[in-house]
Amino acid sequence: MWKMPLEKIDPTITEFQIRIRNNLGENIELANFCDGKNQMTRVPQPCLIPMTKVTSLTNLTIGSLIQVQVQAMNKYCAGPLSQPNTLGQVTEGCPIKMRPVTYKPQEITQNKITVHWSTLVGKEAGGFGVKITQFEIRMKE
C-alpha cells in the first residue's frame, strides 16, 4: 500500500506515478490500480493491489520482495523515480502440491485408517507469513 506523503506537497505537482518492479527488473506502471491523480486530494487514497494481481503482473516467485517506486509529475514532465524500497512486503500465493499421504498398516482397522502428511511451511505454504487454514481430505474408492 502506498499513501501520499504527509508533508505539504508542492502545488506544482500534478500527480504521482506508482510503479512496481517485475521479475526482469522492469517497472510496470500501476495506473489501473493506483491512480496518482487521486493522491493529490487532501484525503490520502491508499494504493491497494490484491496479492494475486501483484504476482500475475510481476511474475515474482513466492517470497520475493515487492519493490515499488514513485515518481512525481508536474505540467512539464515526470521527475526521477524514487529509489526502490529495500524492505517490505514479499509475495505470497497458493500452497504448492502436497507430498503424498502416508499410513502405517498397524493403524488400519475395519472402521478407520489413520493417515499422516507433512505440514507445509514457508514457500511451500504460499509464503513465510502464510499459514495453512485447512486441509481437504479426499478418498478414492
Image (cartoon, rainbow, N blue to C red):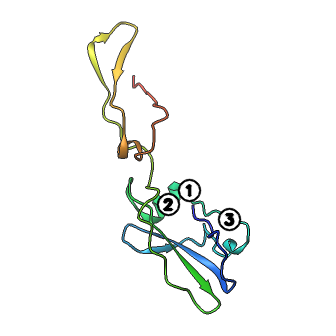
Instruction: Judge depth for marks 3 and 2 and give the one in front.
Output: 3
Residue at the spot of label 2: 54
- Residue corresponding to mark 3: 45
- Residue 78 lies left or right of residue 104; in this view the side is right
How packed mark 1 is, by other alpha carbons closer than 10 Å (few <14, some 14-19, many 20 or more), is few
| Residue 61 drawn above or below residue 33 | above
Give the residue at x 49% y 60%: 54
Above or below, comparing residue 33 to residue 52 in the picture: below
Q: Nearer the viewer, residue 69 or 109?
A: 69
Which of 100/53 is in front?
53
In the picture of the structure, the residue carrying the numbered disc 1 is: 50
Q: Position of residue 65 (x, y in %)?
A: 41, 60
| Residue extending furthest toward the bottom | 76
Task: Name the residue at the left extreme.
Answer: 105
- Which residue corresponds to the image point at 65% horizontal and 90% vertical from the top-left? 75
The reply to whether the C-beta atoms of the residues labelled 1 and 2 are less than 8 Å apart is: yes
Question: Residue 40 at x, y = what percent?
Answer: 69, 75
Q: Amino acid at mark 3?
A: Gln
Query: Which is more N-terminal, label 2 or label 3?
Result: 3
Q: CA distance from mark 1 to mark 2?
A: 6 Å
